[in-house]
Amino acid sequence: MNLRKLSFAICWLACCTIVIEAQTPAARAADPPAGSQFQAGFGKRDITPPAGLPMWGYGARHDELSEGAVDQLWAKAVVIHAGNAKLALVGLDLGRGPTWPMMEKIRRALAEKAKIDHVLISGSHTHHGPVIELTDRDGFGKGKFDKAVAYSKRLPDLIIEAILDADRAAVPCRLGIATRDVTLNRNRHTKHEPKPTEPMLAVLRFDDAAGKAIAVLVNFAAHAVMTDTKIMKYSADYPGFMQRRVEAALKTNCLFMQGAAGDMSVNAGTHSGPQGFGEYLGDVVTELAKSAHSTVPAHPSIRGKVDDFVFRSRTDFTSPRILNGYSRAFFPELTRNFVEEFRHGVPVELNTILLNGDTALVGASGEFFCNHSNRLKQRAYVPHTFFFGYCDGHSMYFPTIEAASEGGYGGDATVSPVEVGAGEQVINRALINIYSMLGKFKEHDYAPGPVPKQTASTSR
Protein backbone atom coordinates (compact mmCIF):
# COMPACT_ATOMS: atom_id res chain seq x y z
CA MET A 1 0.00 0.00 0.00
CA ASN A 2 1.37 3.43 -0.97
CA LEU A 3 0.64 5.69 2.00
CA ARG A 4 1.43 8.82 -0.05
CA LYS A 5 -1.57 8.05 -2.24
CA LEU A 6 -4.17 8.14 0.56
CA SER A 7 -7.20 10.15 -0.41
CA PHE A 8 -7.56 13.51 1.29
CA ALA A 9 -11.30 13.31 0.72
CA ILE A 10 -11.85 10.55 3.30
CA CYS A 11 -9.90 12.13 6.15
CA TRP A 12 -11.63 12.89 9.46
CA LEU A 13 -11.20 16.64 9.12
CA ALA A 14 -13.69 17.65 11.79
CA CYS A 15 -11.90 15.72 14.47
CA CYS A 16 -8.20 15.84 13.87
CA THR A 17 -5.27 16.67 11.62
CA ILE A 18 -4.05 13.66 9.73
CA VAL A 19 -0.38 13.09 9.06
CA ILE A 20 0.60 10.48 6.50
CA GLU A 21 4.29 9.65 6.51
CA ALA A 22 6.21 8.23 3.61
CA GLN A 23 9.83 7.27 4.00
CA THR A 24 11.92 6.34 1.00
CA PRO A 25 14.31 3.39 1.09
CA ALA A 26 17.17 5.88 1.05
CA ALA A 27 15.90 7.40 4.28
CA ARG A 28 16.01 3.99 5.98
CA ALA A 29 19.36 2.94 4.62
CA ALA A 30 22.45 2.89 6.75
CA ASP A 31 25.06 5.57 6.27
CA PRO A 32 27.31 4.87 3.27
CA PRO A 33 30.98 4.22 3.94
CA ALA A 34 33.18 7.22 4.68
CA GLY A 35 34.80 8.57 1.55
CA SER A 36 31.92 7.64 -0.79
CA GLN A 37 31.95 9.88 -3.80
CA PHE A 38 30.09 13.17 -3.66
CA GLN A 39 28.93 14.45 -7.05
CA ALA A 40 26.81 17.27 -8.42
CA GLY A 41 25.63 18.51 -11.80
CA PHE A 42 23.57 21.40 -13.18
CA GLY A 43 20.82 21.59 -15.77
CA LYS A 44 18.22 24.13 -16.89
CA ARG A 45 15.29 24.64 -19.24
CA ASP A 46 13.58 27.76 -20.53
CA ILE A 47 10.01 27.66 -19.18
CA THR A 48 8.86 31.03 -20.53
CA PRO A 49 5.24 30.58 -21.71
CA PRO A 50 3.84 32.06 -24.89
CA ALA A 51 1.85 35.27 -24.62
CA GLY A 52 -1.84 34.90 -23.91
CA LEU A 53 -1.91 33.07 -20.58
CA PRO A 54 -3.56 34.45 -17.41
CA MET A 55 -0.95 35.77 -15.01
CA TRP A 56 -0.43 34.48 -11.47
CA GLY A 57 -0.37 36.38 -8.21
CA TYR A 58 -2.69 39.41 -8.27
CA GLY A 59 -6.42 38.85 -7.99
CA ALA A 60 -7.20 42.28 -9.46
CA ARG A 61 -5.92 41.10 -12.84
CA HIS A 62 -8.66 38.46 -12.92
CA ASP A 63 -8.22 36.58 -16.21
CA GLU A 64 -6.42 39.33 -18.14
CA LEU A 65 -3.90 37.73 -20.48
CA SER A 66 -0.16 38.29 -20.68
CA GLU A 67 1.30 40.29 -23.55
CA GLY A 68 4.71 38.65 -23.72
CA ALA A 69 7.84 38.59 -21.57
CA VAL A 70 10.16 41.15 -19.98
CA ASP A 71 12.74 38.42 -19.41
CA GLN A 72 12.97 34.65 -19.60
CA LEU A 73 11.69 32.28 -16.95
CA TRP A 74 13.84 29.26 -16.09
CA ALA A 75 13.79 25.93 -14.32
CA LYS A 76 17.28 25.40 -12.91
CA ALA A 77 18.38 22.20 -11.20
CA VAL A 78 21.27 20.84 -9.19
CA VAL A 79 21.33 17.08 -8.72
CA ILE A 80 23.50 15.70 -5.92
CA HIS A 81 24.81 12.13 -5.78
CA ALA A 82 25.88 11.14 -2.27
CA GLY A 83 26.42 7.63 -1.03
CA ASN A 84 23.60 5.51 -2.39
CA ALA A 85 21.03 8.27 -3.02
CA LYS A 86 20.30 11.27 -5.23
CA LEU A 87 18.74 14.65 -4.47
CA ALA A 88 17.34 17.19 -6.96
CA LEU A 89 17.17 20.86 -5.92
CA VAL A 90 15.21 22.98 -8.38
CA GLY A 91 14.50 26.71 -8.52
CA LEU A 92 11.58 27.87 -10.68
CA ASP A 93 10.89 31.39 -11.92
CA LEU A 94 7.22 30.85 -11.10
CA GLY A 95 4.81 32.00 -8.44
CA ARG A 96 4.58 28.62 -6.76
CA GLY A 97 5.81 25.05 -6.80
CA PRO A 98 4.29 22.52 -9.23
CA THR A 99 0.77 21.26 -8.62
CA TRP A 100 0.26 17.90 -6.90
CA PRO A 101 -0.42 16.02 -10.19
CA MET A 102 2.67 17.66 -11.70
CA MET A 103 4.76 16.56 -8.72
CA GLU A 104 3.53 12.98 -9.05
CA LYS A 105 4.51 12.91 -12.72
CA ILE A 106 7.91 14.46 -11.99
CA ARG A 107 8.70 12.07 -9.17
CA ARG A 108 7.61 9.01 -11.14
CA ALA A 109 9.74 9.97 -14.15
CA LEU A 110 12.82 10.75 -12.05
CA ALA A 111 12.57 7.51 -10.11
CA GLU A 112 12.18 5.46 -13.28
CA LYS A 113 14.78 7.24 -15.43
CA ALA A 114 17.45 8.25 -12.93
CA LYS A 115 16.65 6.65 -9.55
CA ILE A 116 16.25 10.10 -8.00
CA ASP A 117 14.20 9.65 -4.82
CA HIS A 118 14.41 13.12 -3.29
CA VAL A 119 13.06 16.23 -5.03
CA LEU A 120 12.74 19.81 -3.73
CA ILE A 121 11.23 22.23 -6.28
CA SER A 122 10.77 25.79 -5.03
CA GLY A 123 8.94 28.57 -6.84
CA SER A 124 10.51 32.02 -6.59
CA HIS A 125 7.03 33.51 -5.99
CA THR A 126 7.26 35.99 -8.82
CA HIS A 127 3.87 37.60 -9.40
CA HIS A 128 4.69 37.95 -13.08
CA GLY A 129 4.57 34.27 -13.94
CA PRO A 130 1.74 32.29 -15.56
CA VAL A 131 -1.21 30.61 -13.88
CA ILE A 132 -0.37 26.89 -13.85
CA GLU A 133 -3.43 25.51 -12.04
CA LEU A 134 -5.91 25.37 -14.95
CA THR A 135 -6.85 21.87 -16.11
CA ASP A 136 -8.25 20.15 -19.17
CA ARG A 137 -11.92 20.03 -18.12
CA ASP A 138 -14.93 22.07 -19.07
CA GLY A 139 -15.26 24.96 -16.64
CA PHE A 140 -11.76 24.40 -15.25
CA GLY A 141 -9.79 25.82 -18.19
CA LYS A 142 -10.63 23.75 -21.23
CA GLY A 143 -12.12 25.68 -24.12
CA LYS A 144 -11.43 29.16 -22.74
CA PHE A 145 -7.78 28.87 -21.66
CA ASP A 146 -6.48 26.05 -23.86
CA LYS A 147 -3.10 27.74 -24.24
CA ALA A 148 -2.66 27.78 -20.43
CA VAL A 149 -3.79 24.17 -20.15
CA ALA A 150 -1.27 23.14 -22.82
CA TYR A 151 1.52 24.99 -21.01
CA SER A 152 0.68 23.30 -17.71
CA LYS A 153 0.80 19.90 -19.43
CA ARG A 154 4.24 20.68 -20.88
CA LEU A 155 5.75 22.25 -17.73
CA PRO A 156 6.48 19.00 -15.82
CA ASP A 157 8.35 17.62 -18.83
CA LEU A 158 10.56 20.71 -18.97
CA ILE A 159 11.34 20.40 -15.26
CA ILE A 160 12.11 16.71 -15.68
CA GLU A 161 14.44 17.47 -18.59
CA ALA A 162 16.35 20.06 -16.54
CA ILE A 163 16.78 17.60 -13.68
CA LEU A 164 17.87 14.74 -15.93
CA ASP A 165 20.41 17.03 -17.61
CA ALA A 166 21.79 17.90 -14.17
CA ASP A 167 21.93 14.22 -13.23
CA ARG A 168 23.84 13.33 -16.41
CA ALA A 169 26.24 16.24 -15.84
CA ALA A 170 27.17 15.17 -12.31
CA VAL A 171 30.91 15.10 -11.60
CA PRO A 172 32.98 14.70 -8.42
CA CYS A 173 32.21 17.74 -6.37
CA ARG A 174 33.14 19.89 -3.39
CA LEU A 175 30.57 21.82 -1.36
CA GLY A 176 31.00 25.21 0.26
CA ILE A 177 28.34 26.88 2.44
CA ALA A 178 28.29 30.49 3.57
CA THR A 179 25.62 32.55 5.32
CA ARG A 180 25.25 36.15 6.34
CA ASP A 181 22.57 38.05 8.23
CA VAL A 182 21.33 40.96 6.12
CA THR A 183 18.72 43.71 6.43
CA LEU A 184 17.41 43.34 2.88
CA ASN A 185 13.90 42.23 3.80
CA ARG A 186 11.17 43.64 6.05
CA ASN A 187 8.05 42.39 7.77
CA ARG A 188 4.98 43.44 5.80
CA HIS A 189 2.40 41.98 8.18
CA THR A 190 2.80 42.58 11.89
CA LYS A 191 2.22 45.82 13.76
CA HIS A 192 4.03 44.56 16.85
CA GLU A 193 7.58 45.71 17.62
CA PRO A 194 10.18 44.50 17.15
CA LYS A 195 9.01 43.17 13.80
CA PRO A 196 10.62 39.82 13.01
CA THR A 197 12.47 39.19 9.75
CA GLU A 198 14.32 36.23 8.27
CA PRO A 199 17.83 37.74 8.15
CA MET A 200 19.75 34.81 6.72
CA LEU A 201 21.12 35.06 3.18
CA ALA A 202 22.69 31.71 2.31
CA VAL A 203 24.68 30.25 -0.54
CA LEU A 204 25.63 26.67 -1.33
CA ARG A 205 28.50 26.62 -3.82
CA PHE A 206 29.10 23.43 -5.75
CA ASP A 207 32.65 23.19 -7.19
CA ASP A 208 34.21 20.54 -9.38
CA ALA A 209 37.35 18.72 -8.30
CA ALA A 210 39.52 21.53 -9.68
CA GLY A 211 37.67 24.17 -7.68
CA LYS A 212 35.67 25.63 -10.57
CA ALA A 213 32.11 26.52 -9.60
CA ILE A 214 29.43 24.27 -11.09
CA ALA A 215 26.56 26.24 -9.57
CA VAL A 216 25.63 28.59 -6.76
CA LEU A 217 22.34 28.03 -4.93
CA VAL A 218 20.89 31.10 -3.18
CA ASN A 219 18.35 30.97 -0.34
CA PHE A 220 16.70 34.26 0.69
CA ALA A 221 13.22 35.25 1.88
CA ALA A 222 11.29 38.13 0.30
CA HIS A 223 8.25 38.38 -1.94
CA ALA A 224 9.22 38.75 -5.61
CA VAL A 225 6.73 41.54 -6.32
CA MET A 226 8.90 44.46 -7.42
CA THR A 227 7.77 44.52 -11.06
CA ASP A 228 4.99 47.02 -11.75
CA THR A 229 1.61 45.30 -11.50
CA LYS A 230 0.45 47.12 -14.66
CA ILE A 231 3.10 45.36 -16.76
CA MET A 232 1.27 42.39 -18.25
CA LYS A 233 4.40 40.51 -19.21
CA TYR A 234 6.25 37.60 -17.66
CA SER A 235 9.26 38.40 -15.48
CA ALA A 236 11.44 36.59 -12.98
CA ASP A 237 11.43 39.84 -10.94
CA TYR A 238 14.41 40.57 -8.66
CA PRO A 239 15.52 36.90 -8.37
CA GLY A 240 16.09 36.85 -12.13
CA PHE A 241 18.30 39.94 -12.06
CA MET A 242 20.14 38.54 -9.04
CA GLN A 243 20.85 35.24 -10.77
CA ARG A 244 22.10 36.86 -13.96
CA ARG A 245 24.38 39.16 -11.94
CA VAL A 246 25.93 36.24 -10.07
CA GLU A 247 26.35 34.19 -13.24
CA ALA A 248 28.14 37.05 -14.99
CA ALA A 249 30.41 37.74 -12.02
CA LEU A 250 31.36 34.15 -11.22
CA LYS A 251 31.11 32.63 -14.71
CA THR A 252 28.90 29.86 -13.40
CA ASN A 253 25.24 28.95 -12.94
CA CYS A 254 22.94 30.36 -10.26
CA LEU A 255 19.59 29.15 -8.98
CA PHE A 256 17.26 30.70 -6.40
CA MET A 257 15.29 28.89 -3.69
CA GLN A 258 12.76 31.15 -1.97
CA GLY A 259 12.58 31.08 1.83
CA ALA A 260 9.82 31.68 4.39
CA ALA A 261 8.55 34.79 2.60
CA GLY A 262 4.92 34.76 3.72
CA ASP A 263 5.35 38.00 5.67
CA MET A 264 8.57 39.18 4.04
CA SER A 265 8.88 42.01 1.52
CA VAL A 266 12.05 43.45 0.03
CA ASN A 267 13.81 46.18 2.01
CA ALA A 268 15.26 47.89 -1.05
CA GLY A 269 16.51 51.16 0.39
CA THR A 270 18.18 53.11 -2.40
CA HIS A 271 18.26 50.04 -4.66
CA SER A 272 14.87 50.57 -6.25
CA GLY A 273 13.10 48.38 -8.78
CA PRO A 274 13.61 44.71 -9.56
CA GLN A 275 16.80 45.34 -11.52
CA GLY A 276 18.37 47.73 -9.01
CA PHE A 277 17.64 45.53 -6.02
CA GLY A 278 18.28 42.24 -7.82
CA GLU A 279 21.70 43.33 -9.03
CA TYR A 280 22.64 44.71 -5.61
CA LEU A 281 21.57 41.43 -4.00
CA GLY A 282 23.60 39.64 -6.67
CA ASP A 283 26.70 41.59 -5.66
CA VAL A 284 26.19 40.58 -2.02
CA VAL A 285 25.67 36.96 -3.07
CA THR A 286 28.81 37.04 -5.22
CA GLU A 287 30.89 38.26 -2.31
CA LEU A 288 29.36 35.64 -0.03
CA ALA A 289 29.91 32.85 -2.56
CA LYS A 290 33.57 33.78 -2.93
CA SER A 291 33.97 33.44 0.84
CA ALA A 292 32.59 29.89 0.91
CA HIS A 293 35.40 27.35 1.35
CA SER A 294 34.45 24.21 -0.55
CA THR A 295 35.52 20.73 0.58
CA VAL A 296 34.65 17.14 -0.20
CA PRO A 297 32.22 15.99 2.52
CA ALA A 298 33.80 13.50 4.88
CA HIS A 299 30.69 11.30 4.96
CA PRO A 300 28.56 11.91 1.85
CA SER A 301 24.97 10.86 2.44
CA ILE A 302 21.39 11.83 1.72
CA ARG A 303 18.57 10.90 4.05
CA GLY A 304 15.05 12.08 3.29
CA LYS A 305 11.50 11.93 4.55
CA VAL A 306 8.20 13.12 3.10
CA ASP A 307 5.18 13.94 5.27
CA ASP A 308 1.75 14.60 3.79
CA PHE A 309 -0.62 16.50 6.06
CA VAL A 310 -4.28 17.32 5.69
CA PHE A 311 -5.29 20.18 7.98
CA ARG A 312 -8.77 21.42 8.72
CA SER A 313 -9.84 24.50 6.80
CA ARG A 314 -11.05 27.70 8.45
CA THR A 315 -12.96 28.46 5.25
CA ASP A 316 -15.94 26.42 4.09
CA PHE A 317 -15.10 25.72 0.47
CA THR A 318 -18.36 23.83 -0.02
CA SER A 319 -20.31 27.08 0.40
CA PRO A 320 -21.65 28.61 -2.85
CA ARG A 321 -21.20 32.04 -1.27
CA ILE A 322 -17.49 31.36 -0.70
CA LEU A 323 -17.14 30.03 -4.25
CA ASN A 324 -18.77 33.15 -5.69
CA GLY A 325 -16.56 35.40 -3.57
CA TYR A 326 -13.35 33.79 -4.78
CA SER A 327 -14.62 33.77 -8.36
CA ARG A 328 -15.16 37.52 -8.21
CA ALA A 329 -11.78 38.09 -6.53
CA PHE A 330 -9.88 35.99 -9.11
CA PHE A 331 -11.76 34.27 -11.95
CA PRO A 332 -14.14 31.29 -12.05
CA GLU A 333 -11.95 28.68 -13.77
CA LEU A 334 -9.02 29.25 -11.42
CA THR A 335 -11.34 29.27 -8.41
CA ARG A 336 -12.93 25.93 -9.34
CA ASN A 337 -9.53 24.24 -9.45
CA PHE A 338 -8.52 25.83 -6.16
CA VAL A 339 -11.77 25.00 -4.37
CA GLU A 340 -11.70 21.41 -5.58
CA GLU A 341 -8.21 20.99 -4.10
CA PHE A 342 -9.14 22.50 -0.73
CA ARG A 343 -12.73 21.27 -0.42
CA HIS A 344 -11.86 18.46 2.01
CA GLY A 345 -9.09 20.24 3.91
CA VAL A 346 -5.76 21.90 3.27
CA PRO A 347 -3.17 19.45 1.90
CA VAL A 348 0.43 20.21 2.81
CA GLU A 349 3.67 18.47 1.87
CA LEU A 350 6.80 18.61 4.02
CA ASN A 351 10.17 17.40 2.74
CA THR A 352 13.02 16.96 5.20
CA ILE A 353 16.50 16.19 3.90
CA LEU A 354 19.65 15.59 5.91
CA LEU A 355 22.65 16.08 3.63
CA ASN A 356 26.03 14.67 4.66
CA GLY A 357 24.84 14.40 8.25
CA ASP A 358 25.36 18.11 8.91
CA THR A 359 23.02 20.11 6.64
CA ALA A 360 19.22 20.12 6.95
CA LEU A 361 17.14 21.15 3.94
CA VAL A 362 13.46 21.63 4.77
CA GLY A 363 10.90 22.34 2.06
CA ALA A 364 7.20 23.02 2.63
CA SER A 365 4.36 23.67 0.20
CA GLY A 366 3.16 27.05 1.39
CA GLU A 367 3.86 30.67 2.22
CA PHE A 368 5.34 30.17 5.68
CA PHE A 369 5.95 33.22 7.87
CA CYS A 370 9.52 34.07 8.74
CA ASN A 371 9.43 33.02 12.40
CA HIS A 372 8.67 29.46 11.34
CA SER A 373 12.04 29.40 9.58
CA ASN A 374 13.80 31.31 12.35
CA ARG A 375 12.58 28.90 15.02
CA LEU A 376 13.42 25.87 12.91
CA LYS A 377 17.01 27.07 12.59
CA GLN A 378 17.24 27.89 16.29
CA ARG A 379 16.01 24.45 17.31
CA ALA A 380 17.82 22.27 14.77
CA TYR A 381 21.15 21.33 16.30
CA VAL A 382 23.03 20.84 13.03
CA PRO A 383 25.68 23.14 11.55
CA HIS A 384 23.44 24.32 8.70
CA THR A 385 19.66 24.49 8.29
CA PHE A 386 17.82 25.98 5.30
CA PHE A 387 14.11 26.44 4.69
CA PHE A 388 12.55 26.46 1.21
CA GLY A 389 9.03 27.81 0.82
CA TYR A 390 6.57 27.35 -2.09
CA CYS A 391 8.15 23.91 -2.38
CA ASP A 392 6.64 20.88 -4.15
CA GLY A 393 3.17 22.43 -4.21
CA HIS A 394 1.29 25.43 -2.84
CA SER A 395 -1.02 25.50 0.17
CA MET A 396 -1.47 29.25 0.66
CA TYR A 397 -0.30 31.20 3.74
CA PHE A 398 0.98 29.67 6.99
CA PRO A 399 1.07 32.42 9.62
CA THR A 400 2.47 31.75 13.05
CA ILE A 401 -0.12 31.49 15.82
CA GLU A 402 0.57 35.03 16.97
CA ALA A 403 0.41 36.35 13.41
CA ALA A 404 -2.94 34.62 12.87
CA SER A 405 -4.22 36.39 15.99
CA GLU A 406 -3.50 39.73 14.29
CA GLY A 407 -5.46 38.76 11.19
CA GLY A 408 -4.97 40.93 8.13
CA TYR A 409 -3.70 39.81 4.74
CA GLY A 410 -1.76 36.58 5.16
CA GLY A 411 -3.17 36.00 8.63
CA ASP A 412 -6.92 35.66 8.14
CA ALA A 413 -8.91 32.79 6.70
CA THR A 414 -9.47 34.29 3.25
CA VAL A 415 -5.88 33.64 2.13
CA SER A 416 -4.78 31.46 5.04
CA PRO A 417 -7.54 28.84 5.25
CA VAL A 418 -5.35 26.34 7.11
CA GLU A 419 -6.19 25.79 10.78
CA VAL A 420 -4.36 27.95 13.32
CA GLY A 421 -1.16 26.27 14.49
CA ALA A 422 -0.65 24.18 11.37
CA GLY A 423 2.69 25.81 10.59
CA GLU A 424 4.00 25.01 14.04
CA GLN A 425 2.98 21.38 13.59
CA VAL A 426 4.83 21.19 10.28
CA ILE A 427 8.00 22.70 11.75
CA ASN A 428 7.85 20.38 14.76
CA ARG A 429 7.61 17.41 12.43
CA ALA A 430 10.63 18.65 10.47
CA LEU A 431 12.62 18.81 13.70
CA ILE A 432 11.58 15.30 14.68
CA ASN A 433 12.62 14.10 11.23
CA ILE A 434 16.04 15.76 11.51
CA TYR A 435 16.76 14.26 14.91
CA SER A 436 15.43 10.85 13.84
CA MET A 437 17.80 10.85 10.88
CA LEU A 438 20.60 11.75 13.26
CA GLY A 439 19.73 8.69 15.33
CA LYS A 440 18.46 10.67 18.34
CA PHE A 441 14.92 9.21 18.18
CA LYS A 442 13.45 5.86 17.30
CA GLU A 443 10.10 5.60 15.54
CA HIS A 444 8.24 4.68 18.74
CA ASP A 445 9.61 7.78 20.51
CA TYR A 446 7.09 10.11 18.84
CA ALA A 447 3.48 9.99 17.70
CA PRO A 448 3.07 9.48 13.95
CA GLY A 449 -0.44 10.98 14.01
CA PRO A 450 -3.78 9.25 13.36
CA VAL A 451 -4.32 7.44 10.08
CA PRO A 452 -7.78 6.99 8.52
CA LYS A 453 -9.21 3.49 8.46
CA GLN A 454 -10.30 3.64 4.82
CA THR A 455 -8.09 4.36 1.85
CA ALA A 456 -8.51 5.21 -1.81
CA SER A 457 -6.27 6.38 -4.62
CA THR A 458 -5.66 10.06 -5.25
CA SER A 459 -3.86 12.17 -7.80
CA ARG A 460 -1.07 12.90 -5.32
Image (tube, rainbow, N blue to C red):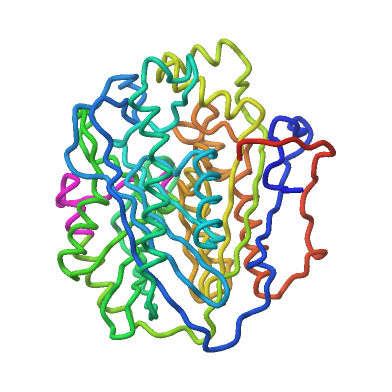
Q: Residue 98, image x and y in percent?
A: 46, 42
In the image, residue 445 sits, relative to residue 234, either above or below, namely below
In the image, residue 435 sits, relative to residue 93, either above or below, namely below
Q: Is residue 322 left or right of residue 218?
A: right
Q: Quadrant of residue 320?
A: top right
Task: Tell me the residue at 33%/33% (across/down).
Answer: 130
Q: Residue 299, image x and y in percent?
A: 54, 84
Task: Tell me the residue at 40%/56% (across/down).
Answer: 90
Viewer-nearest residue: 444 or 152: 152
Q: Quadrant of residue 432?
A: bottom right
Give the position of the C terminus as an image quadrant.
top right
Q: Is residue 240 left or right of residue 136?
A: left
Residue 248 magenta-drawn? no
Q: Please state the total of marks drawn on the protein image.
A: 0
Residue 270 magenta-drawn? yes
Task: Tell me the residue at 49%/30% (across/down).
Answer: 415
Viewer-nearest residue: 91 or 182: 91
In the image, residue 71 sits, relative to residue 302, either above or below, namely above
Viewer-nearest residue: 408 or 49: 49
Q: Is residue 65 left or right of residue 306?
A: left
Viewer-nearest residue: 307 or 46: 46
**Residue interval drawn in magenta:** 261-281
Q: Residue 230, image x and y in percent?
A: 20, 27
Q: Residue 247, image x and y in percent?
A: 20, 64
Q: Residue furthest right?
A: 453
Q: Residue furthest front?
A: 113
